[in-house]
Image (spheres, grey):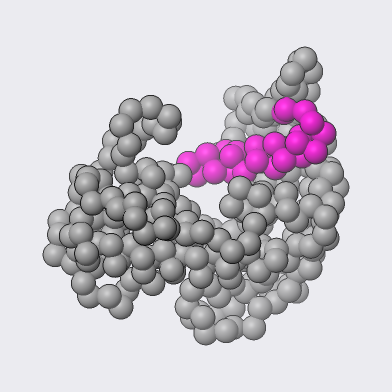
Amino acid sequence: MTDRKYSVASIGSRIDGFLRLTLQNAGFKASYEIQDVASSGDEFETPDVVVKFAGPDVDLILANRAELLLALEHVTMEMLDMPSEDHSRISFDANDYRLLRIEELRLSALTAAEKVKRTGAPFRFNPMNSRERRVIHLALRGDTAVRSESAGSGPQRQVVVYPAGMASLPELPYAPAPRHSGPPRGDRGGPPRGGRDRDRGGRDRGGRPPRPRP
Amino acid sequence: MKQLIEDIAKALVDIPEEVVVKEVLGEQVTVLELRVAASDLGKVIGKQGRTARSIRTILGAAGMKLNRRFTLEILE
């Protein structure tokens, strides 16, 4: 994709110092390896450096859609003062979570595209971070029958898939905690109105088909 | 936990000498009050509050291992 910008030689010891202290202070039982990544030509994710975790607390690290893994990654990149456009250059991982997640996102992108073509209605994914949204956009890039765009802001930003010629829906008003009340809206990943079929086994919650492993 | 927050905050800010963490013990929950230099506030909060949210996630997971709830207050 682009030239290597970071390497174990340039940032490895700072990552190591920060992580060692943080894991120890937090009482997380995990080890990690910091490795350079040979460029793979995979357009979905080509980090320069990967940090791989192992050990008894990997389950905790990967719980809740790898919430802790992503938090450690984010704080580490902020500690390194990396500009946000570089944030895909370092990737934290454990048990191949990242690879499996990308596969999962690609599959849900294709499922969403099929559904949009069949129903003619837009499909709204659950909110995702920019790296995950990018995977969805890339997966749909070759499909001329649909188009995808991101809508909303901050942690609520989400991908919406439309039939190719359809105009964008108006942005939902920003509401920090709408999940518990009111009629169902787009935040469960279903299309905004109608067309929600429940007869296909998979529940089509945006970005989350059944996973074969915990 | 005080040490956890203090070390993370010091790693993020420009003026680590001004990082102060105070631990307030409640019955159910321990509150950690973080103070940093005014010019460093953005560094611990981050865009859209993402850095603060990440620190809270780390704190929450660490607290889970101790069966205790911790909350982080970032004070101006």
Query: Does the rendering let one see residue A17?
Result: no
User: What span is colored magenta in the figure?
Assistant: B44-70
Query: In the picture provided, is B56 more to the left or to the right than B4?
Result: left
Q: Residue A76 sits in which quadrant? A: bottom right
Q: How many marks?
A: 0
Q: Would residue A186 be visible to someone looking at this image? A: yes
Asked if residue A99 is positioned above or below residue B13 in the image, the reply reads below
Q: Which percent across, then down, holds residue A98?
A: 59, 66
Query: A61 and B47: which one is in front?
Result: A61
Which residue lies at the image location 80% right of the left edge and 38% below the top edge? B65
Measured along the vertical axis of the image, is residue A170 above or below residue A134? above
**Going by the image, does A115 lie left or right of A137?**
left
State yes or no: residue A26 in magenta. no
Furthest-top residue in this view: B27
The residue nearer to you, when weighing B44 against A127, is A127
Q: Quadrant of residue A54?
A: bottom right
Name the main secondary structure of what is drawn in magenta.
helix
Q: Is residue A203 left or right of residue A185?
A: right
The image shows residue A32 at horizontal and vertical percentages of 79, 63
- Is the C terminus of chain A in the top left, top right, bottom left or bottom right quadrant? bottom right
Does the magenta segment cover residue B46? Answer: yes
Above or below: residue A43 compared with residue B38:
below
| Residue occupying the point 34% across, 52% down | A198
Q: Position of residue A153 (x, y in %)?
A: 37, 45
Q: Residue visible at 43% across and 68% down?
A: A107
In the displayed image of the protein, which residue is found farthest to the front? A199
Q: Residue at x 52, y 39 (%)?
A: B49
Q: Position of residue A46 (x, y in %)?
A: 55, 75
